[in-house]
Amino acid sequence: MSDPTRSEIARSRRWVIKVGSALLTNDGRGLDGEIIGGLVAQLAALKERGIEVVLVSSGAVAAGVVRLGWSRRPSLLHDLQAAAAVGQSILIQSYEAAFSQYGIATAQVLLGHDDVSARDRYLNARGTLTTLLKLGVVPIVNENDTVVTDEIRFGDNDTLAALVANLVDAEALLLLTDQQGLYHEDPRLNPEAELVETRDVHDPELDDMAGEGGLLGRGGMITKLRAARLAARSGTETVIASGRMQDVIGQVTRGVPLGTWLRTGKRPQNARKQWLAAMVQTPGSLVLDEGAVRVLRESGRSLLAVGVRMAEGRFERGDMVSCRGPDGREVARGLVNYSADETRRIMGQPSAAIEGLLGYQSDEELIHRDNLVLC
Ligand SMILES: Nc1ncnc2c1ncn2[C@@H]1O[C@H](COP(=O)(O)OP(=O)(O)O)[C@@H](O)[C@H]1O
Ligand SMILES: N[C@@H](CCC(=O)OP(=O)(O)O)C(=O)O
């Protein structure tokens, strides 16, 4: 039974799937191997269908607490960090062992606040994750708990999953938890509460429905709703569903109306570009030659160093720069892969010469087309 209104999400070719602590841990007794095995089988089937997936998994602290023989989750930051460090390797081992049965390689990706907010690191994180996807690897992301301080913690992995969805331009985000989805009220408090099947993600009524999390999880539905809105900034659709349901991943990704769909109603690429366009001031600009102006305008391709005549101002890798034609008119804006100094050394040169000129090559393009907005 496929809900036609969900056919839109069923077309998504790149998913971020987040698995919460509440689901993964066996009543606080450590990781639930059966749940992990079941999820991995579903993820392997998803990859068989040619769908790319980034997994965001919680559970490090819970697994560490058990391994250290502690009776409950500590409250001191350093204790939490120690538990996360111990538990993270157990978490990754469990996934790697399960995925290897399907011949699928995994990669551990630990991210902190700076990795998604500082623009140079944002580009690096994006480059690594998209490369892993191209290689057919399943990246398993968690917060880099051992080095974060309270001030800069995401704390809940719902937010992290949304930022990862922004980072890789995922078309859809699936938040798997211990409930069937978002209810009109917290079902722990009101067992009669009804499931919300579909809503516009920005509907203000949702704010009154979402409550806090349980003992094991962190943010409850409040952070899931916030994450869905954050993901919507880059056009990503969000579904919240129960990770305990049989073949939930297969069903949701095929458009079966399970859980709660928080609708975005924007096309991912457009939305991401709007977000980029509104993002920052431009500390510098590039003057392009006629050929480069034509390529950007007419074929929507990336900007290569060969088409740049001049670099003005001071900018760093990851800064937003303005691109102007020989007549001085702005043609585009985008996140640049090389600093102003580096750009001056490679401009006018083919990409193959970058390594010889700089001694390294981080990217072939000066501005990748995904990070470029035409004016
Ligand atoms: N309106 C609501 N609908 C469903 N669950 C809710 C709602 N408000 C609060 N919750 C709580 O949110 C919990 C899930 O969030 P959380 O504990 O953070 O889990 P996870 O570790 O999966 O992120 C549920 O167990 C539920 O008790
Ligand atoms: N990074 C932490 C996850 C934080 C957390 O509990 O998140 P979640 O339960 O998904 O809201 C861990 O791995 O334990």
Image (tube, rainbow, N blue to C red):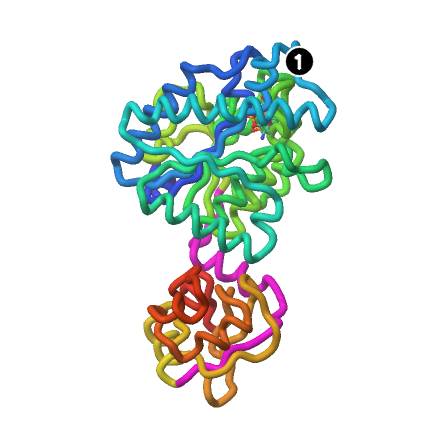
Q: Is residue 244 located in the magenta-colored stretch of the structure?
A: no
Q: Which residue appears at 71% of the width and 28% of the height?
A: 77
| Left or right of 92 on screen, residue 315 | right
Element type at mark 1:
loop
- Tell me where residue 362 sits by quadrant: bottom left
State the quadrant of the N terminus: top left
Q: Is residue 271 magenta?
A: yes
In this image, 193 relative to 267: left or right? right
The image position of residue 370, as x and y in percent, is 42, 60
Q: Nearer the viewer, residue 326 or 217?
A: 326
User: Could you say where residue 62 lies in the image, as x and y percent from the top left?
Assistant: 58, 19
Report ligand 1 position as a quadrant: top right
Q: Which residue is mark 1?
A: 72
Name the residue at the bottom extreme. 327
In percent of width and height, residue 195 lies at: 52, 26
- Residue 340 to residue 251: above or below: below
**Image point 25% across, 34% down: which residue?**
48
Whether residue 239 is visible, yes or no, is no
Q: Which amino acid does the dot numbered 1 rest on?
A: Arg
Residue 258: image location, x then y, percent? 41, 28
Q: On the rendered structure, is 236 left or right of 37?
A: right
Label 1: few (<14), some (14–19) or many (≥20) C-alpha neighbours in 10 Å: few
- Name the residue located 26 percent from the left edge and 37 percent from the top edge: 49
**Mark 1 C-beta to ligand 2 under 8 Å:** no
Q: Is residue 121 above or below residue 53?
A: below
- Regarding residue 69, the answer to whether it shows in the image is yes
The image quarter containing residue 216 is top right
The region drawn magenta spans: 263-289
